[in-house]
Amino acid sequence: MYRRLMEHLTTAVLLLDGELRLRWMNPAAEALLAISLSRLKGQPLPSLIDGEEDIGGLLAKARDEFHPFTQREARLTLTTGEVLTVDYTVSPLGADELLLEVEPRDRLLRISREEALQTRQETIKVLARGLAHEVKNPLGGIRGAAQLLERDLADPGLKEFTRIIIEEVDRLRDLVDSMLGPNRMVRHEPLNIHKVLERVRALLIVEHPAVWIERDYDPSLPELSGDEAQMIQALLNVARNAVEAMTEAGTASPRLRLRTRARRQFTLGAERHRLVCEVAIIDNGPGIPDSLRETLFYPMVSGRAEGSGLGLSIAQSILHQHQGLIECDSVPGHTQFRLLIPLEKRHD
Ligand SMILES: Nc1ncnc2c1ncn2[C@@H]1O[C@H](COP(=O)(O)OP(=O)(O)O)[C@@H](O)[C@H]1O
Ligand SMILES: [Mg+2]
């Protein structure tokens, strides 16, 4: 009966012998560690999960001192290469038996956070689009009327005012167009992410020659499927923010790093993907202002006086159109934006 109870628990439970070899684990543990009991049984656990701390040492200490303990936010590297953040509790059951309960932290937190974030972003996007359409409709009429007026003005000195009307209408139209985001369908063509990054790099070198741009590419990454022009736009929006932030803050030796990696068994939103392409854009600038953290990806949120606040919102919608997303971690001196794009369709 106890075994049946264990088998239905959603908490991962492992039973180790005195030599820290795996005696048994429940299906929740198999799912978490992405390995079956039959493959792992009898093997020493510390050799299979590689942590930041010395897990073997901690387990042995609990066994020798016969004292339970809980380790929070431990990082484990699984045999699949995936890194998990977990809390785990070790309870010695007897001289030669240890009970290990493992609870994942980041995946759960991240999935729920991403879902909430995506829903919020969708809502804001729908609102912004509706508003943009309403603003755009009368603009054509205003522009046309100003042109007619300009033609019939007797006093050329008054033309300055109709010019202003026309120019401001054009500016508003461009703003509204960028709020509406990419309006054509995304193409799905073979796309080489490194070619895209090289384009972005070439543009930035011209714009900001003082910034040192470093490349750290994973040449084994296969081709993606997507829209090259839009992907250039997304990456440029993110990378340009980084160099602008560094330039404006007067960062000493400003550095931008463009890094690509393949991530296996990666969950984006609620979907698990076999292979995901990660493009990280890392800068050593001032970091994201605290006041922007929660709303960073919303349209019209900007930390700069002349900013439109549309760059990241557009980049995020382009990523969504590619079933991907953008994440961000930032502390002063180290800001990282990660663009995650699925390479292989989810397994259903
Ligand atoms: N790498 C970065 N370092 C510091 N701040 C950043 C970085 N990326 C974005 N930001 C902040 O996020 C804001 C929003 O960016 P964005 O949506 O592109 O709008 P904009 O660039 O027009 O302000 C920026 O104004 C800036 O304050
Ligand atoms: Mg920007």
Image (spheres, helix red, strand yellow):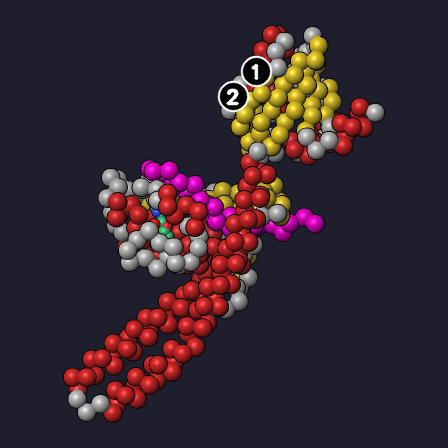
What is the CA distance from the residue labelled 1 to the residue labelled 2? 8 Å
**Residue to which mark 1 is pinned:** 58
Callout 1: SS: helix
Q: Magenta span has 327?
A: yes
Q: Residue furthest right?
A: 1
Point 66% across, 13% down: residue: 92
The reply to whether the residue tagged 2 has its Cβ within 8 angstroms of ligand 1 is no
| Magenta-highlighted residues | 324-348
Query: Can residue 87 be seen from the camera position used here?
Result: yes
Q: Circle 2 — which element?
A: loop
Q: Quadrant of residue 281?
A: top left
Tell me the residue that label 2 is attached to.
53
Say what amino acid the circle numbered 2 marks.
Answer: Glu
Residue at (43, 41) in percent of width and height: 329
Per the image, is 152 magenta? no
- Residue 303: percent from left, percent from top: 33, 51
Relative image position of residue 21 (x, y in whole percent): 68, 17
Q: Residues within 10 Å of mark 2 (few under 14, many from 20)?
A: few
Q: Residue at x 47, y 55 (%)?
A: 316
Residue 239 seen in render: no
Quarter of the N terminus within the rendering: top right
Whether residues under marks 1 and 2 lie with C-beta atoms below 8 angstroms apart, the answer is yes
Amino acid at dot 1: Leu
Question: In the rendered view, does 17 fall on the left or right side of 181?
Answer: right
